[in-house]
Amino acid sequence: MIHYTKIEGLIAPTFTSFNEDGEINTGIISVYAEKLRKKGLKGAFILGSSGEGMLMSVRERKAVAEVWAKERSDEFKLIVHVGANAYKDAQELALHAVELGADALSIMGPTFLQPKTIKELIAYIKIIADVVPNAPLYYYHIPVRTGLNFNMIDLLHEVGDEIPNFVGIKYTNSNFKDMQQCILFDNEKYDILHGSDETLLCGLSLGIKGGIGTTYNLIPELYYGMIEAFDTNNIEKSRQLQAYVVELMNIISKYGGGIVAGKHLMKIANMDCGPCRLPLNTIHSEEAKAMENELKAKGLYDPIKNSFVV
């Protein structure tokens, strides 16, 4: 395994901004990155689920990565998701991200003609990893998107000898038995990053130190408060903050989910990322207003201050 320092703290899985005509808009990235830095984020995870990367062309993904790469520093890491159904595309994206100086890469399993076994999944990851042998590589485990619901502990048992630059998993699933086994595997060898906003407290209780979650774009201070409360044994406060997140995520799910609703919430937080890319719908004005009213009624959003109540 290559030398790699595990991530501690929060990484934002950034949204990709599109113009109304459907073309990418890289013009907001520098302002977006600065907002994340000011809020204490440790870096950006680009072109993943929140970034609609799998709905974009290789050319578009490269263009977005090139602008985000200008924002990376030792204090603000850049992780680039390079997964694609065609491994040739993923290889091209991986090589490009390494040329840009990305701190790490991530690969989601293919969503069409999925691997049927762990060995098949490892073969897919390996053929991409082999072209960038010195680049730290995370597997992006998100069964709700990929349909690949293997136990990740089985992956870890086999991946070490096959892929020396494999460093961890972005774990977006609720199988906490499996997650705990992954955290503890081989004397805590791998970096397991928590990927579900509504269950971060569960991850913390198992030993999670870093996370990548969509609403970290909006209210990272809440999650840092949860982490601080947990670390200082203020369990009741950490539970209250996690309950807040659950309320928020319930409403987000009702109005299209983390990408569709999330992009509108970014807009009202003064970071307009434009419409979603088909086949995702862009939230309609009536739904957007209903969501804002529901957030207000739950005490989660203050329309006067145009901010979330934390």
Image (tube, rainbow, N blue to C red):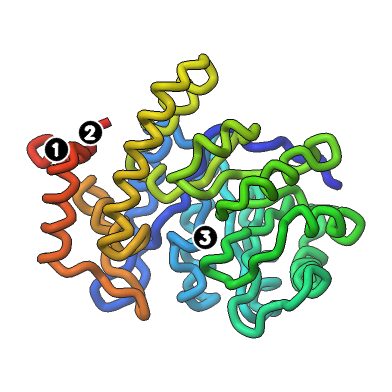
Q: Quadrant of the C terminus?
A: top left
Query: What secondary structure is marked by label 1?
Result: strand
Label 1 to label 2: alpha-carbon separation: 6 Å
Label 1 to label 3: alpha-carbon separation: 34 Å
CB under 8 Å between discs 3 and 2: no
Residue behind mark 3 = 65
Residue shown at 34%/74% (left/top)? 280
Q: Residues within 10 Å of mark 2 (few under 14, many from 20)?
A: some
Marked residue nearer the N-terminal end (3 or 2): 3
Q: Position of residue 43 (x, y in %)?
A: 52, 42
Marked residue nearer the N-terminal end (1 or 3): 3
Q: Position of residue 115 (x, y in %)?
A: 72, 77
Residue behind mark 1 = 302
Residue type indicated by callout 3? Ala
Q: Position of residue 156 (x, y in %)?
A: 80, 53
Q: Position of residue 217 (x, y in %)?
A: 38, 45
Residue behind mark 2 = 309
Q: Residues within 10 Å of mark 1 (few under 14, many from 20)?
A: some
Residue shown at 11%/50% (left/top)? 293
Residue shown at 82%/65% (left/top)? 130
Pick the residue in front: 83 or 89. 83
CB under 8 Å between discs 1 and 2: yes
